[in-house]
Image (cartoon, rainbow, N blue to C red):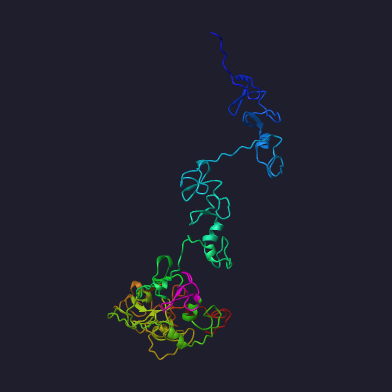
């Protein structure tokens, strides 16, 4: 049987067999290592820069010059102007392959060709090619953050969407606000497929009496509800009654006429009037209002404390009305109204520091209490003045008052009655009553610091003791250096 050698692949460049030790692969063909070079510039190639075209090898630069596009921006580099038509290179134009169309509703909405996952861009649940994902009006390339789905089932950038389907008028035009659009009619810019909106006048939807907006009487819905003292207002109706200033929960003031005002108008209409009031401090208001007009406009509450009578012995001791916690004043367990808690004699308002309870179950200030029930005589009353009143003196003459108890031989030396421990005062040899413990000569009350026991068995102050029983002569007596002839 004759020998049949194994067929080896042929090199497309030289037509000779290519063995495994020297083969280079490009485009499915095997080349010799020495043949693996550019067919135009003979540049040695490798797997990173070789390009195969119909069994011919090219570097990337030569392949672009021979088979690439021509014109401004193409050729050796971007930005250069190439006038090379490729005639000297025997250029062969390759007809581009046209991809097949996809069935209706399954391809790209713009070109109708199948869309694969690697180039898919989604909008309205439909897949677009990345190159087809552009604004319909300005052809601006879009992404997921810039595109807007129009009502005509196409995609737009934000600017074109606002111009075509956005609001019209002052403050609305395209993206920027504060623009006045007056050169383009709505019929030219507004699409017939754009959503139509109609202004709804809530005043026309009337609510039952007492349940709607206090100003217009319309039904108040949750989206436009503003509350004031439990009443529901429309947001557009929640304005000051006088100056129509738009209000909120901070500057709104509820007036007694069931209307709302701003703070300035409320102060002018219902606040205090006169110098220092109205819009600000130190402001002199001369709006022509007199006291009668102010009193007629201001809400009035009768301060009569006797209008609500209390059971006998349980109300205010002065007026007999019921005393509530907000106006409570206490005195010796009795409850008084704040307006009734004043001096019974001079009617001076009192508090817990100034009030004095009199023995007649009434209250007095300290001065009136001292005049009525305090001690009388020189040094009392309006001290240190001399008081001479027509009131009966309440001074008790304790000396003339008969002591209680029985006479005793070892009793008080002065009155002879028994001396108890609570009132005893002791001298050298005797026990005295506290009221009887005074000087026998000048009747000055004594204590342990100025007491002197006389040789006659009685007691004296120091001056009287020295006068009667002290040494006599020059330098003695009442004061040192005096001459006494006693």
Q: How many marks?
A: 0
What segment carries the magenta color?
Answer: 237-263
Q: Position of residue 204 (x, y in %)?
A: 40, 73
Q: Is residue 271 magenta?
A: no
User: Residue 456, can we see it?
Assistant: no
Vertical comparison of 109 with 400: above or below: above
Please give the name of the residue rendered at 48% of the width and 61% of the height, measured from the top-left corner. Answer: 192
Tell which residue pokes out farthest to the bottom in this image.
390
User: Residue 136, can we see it?
Assistant: yes
Please give left or right for residue 392 compared with residue 158 in the image.
left
Residue closer to the observer: 386 or 428: 386
Q: Is residue 259 magenta?
A: yes
Residue closer to the observer: 26 or 383: 26
Tell which residue pokes out farthest to the top in this image.
1
Q: Please tell me whether the stretch drawn in magenta is mainly helix, strand or loop.
A: loop
Vertical comparison of 94 with 157: above or below: above
Please give left or right for residue 474 compared with residue 199 in the image.
right
Quarter residue 423 falls in = bottom left
Please give the name of the residue rendered at 34% of the width and 74% of the height, measured from the top-left corner. Answer: 208
Please give left or right for residue 473 compared with residue 345 in the image.
right
Vertical comparison of 81 with 190: above or below: above
Q: Position of residue 460 (x, y in %)?
A: 44, 78
Tell which residue pokes out farthest to the left in this image.
311
Q: Position of residue 129 (x, y in %)?
A: 53, 45
Q: Position of residue 464 (x, y in %)?
A: 47, 80
């Amino acid at each position: 049987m004759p020998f049949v050698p194994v067929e080896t692949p042929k090199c497309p460049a030289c037509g000779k067999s290519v063995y495994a030790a020297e083969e280079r692969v490009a485009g499915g063909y095997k080349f010799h290592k020495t043949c693996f070079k550019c067919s135009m510039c003979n540049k040695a190639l490798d797997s990173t820069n070789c390009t195969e075209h119909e069994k011919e090898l090219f570097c990337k630069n030569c392949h672009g010059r021979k088979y690439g596009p021509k014109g401004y921006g193409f050729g050796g580099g971007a930005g250069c102007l190439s006038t090379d038509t490729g005639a000297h290179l025997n250029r062969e134009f390759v007809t581009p392959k046209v991809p097949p169309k996809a069935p209706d509703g399954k391809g790209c909405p713009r070109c109708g060709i199948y869309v694969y996952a690697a180039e898919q861009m989604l909008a309205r649940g439909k897949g677009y090619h990345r190159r087809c994902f552009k604004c319909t009006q300005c052809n601006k390339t879009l992404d997921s953050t810039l595109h807007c789905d129009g009502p005509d089932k196409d995609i737009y950038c934000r600017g074109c969407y606002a111009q075509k389907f956005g609001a019209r008028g002052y403050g609305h035009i395209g993206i920027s606000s504060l623009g006045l659009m007056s050169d383009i009619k709505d019929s030219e810019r507004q699409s017939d497929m754009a959503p139509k909106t109609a202004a709804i006048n809530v005043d026309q939807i009337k609510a039952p009496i007492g349940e709607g907006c206090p100003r217009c009487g319309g039904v108040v819905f949750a989206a436009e509800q503003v509350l004031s003292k439990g009443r529901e207002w429309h947001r557009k109706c929640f304005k000051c009654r006088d100056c129509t200033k738009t209000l909120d929960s901070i500057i709104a003031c509820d007036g007694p006429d069931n209307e709302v005002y701003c703070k300035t108008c409320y102060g002018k209409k219902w606040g205090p009037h006169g110098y220092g009031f109205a819009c600000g401090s130190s402001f002199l208001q001369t709006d022509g209002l007199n006291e009668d007009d102010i009193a007629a406009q201001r809400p009035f509450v009768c301060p009569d404390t006797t209008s609500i009578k209390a059971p006998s012995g349980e109300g205010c001791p002065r007026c007999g009305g019921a005393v509530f916690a907000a106006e409570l004043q206490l005195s010796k367990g009795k409850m008084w109204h704040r307006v009734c808690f004043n001096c019974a004699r001079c009617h001076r308002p009192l508090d817990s520091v100034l009030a004095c309870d009199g023995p007649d179950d009434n209250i007095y200030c300290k001065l009136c209490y001292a005049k009525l029930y305090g001690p009388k005589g020189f040094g009392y009353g309006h001290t240190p003045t001399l008081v001479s009143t027509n009131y009966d003196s309440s001074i008790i003459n304790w000396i003339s008052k008969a002591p209680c108890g029985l006479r005793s031989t070892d009793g008080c030396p002065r009155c002879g009655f028994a001396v108890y421990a609570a009132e005893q005062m002791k001298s050298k040899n005797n026990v005295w009553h506290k009221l009887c413990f005074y000087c026998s000569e000048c009747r000055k009350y004594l204590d342990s610091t100025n007491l002197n026991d006389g040789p006659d068995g009685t007691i004296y102050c120091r001056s009287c003791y020295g006068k009667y029983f002290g040494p006599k002569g020059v330098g003695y007596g009442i004061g040192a250096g005096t001459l006494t002839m006693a």
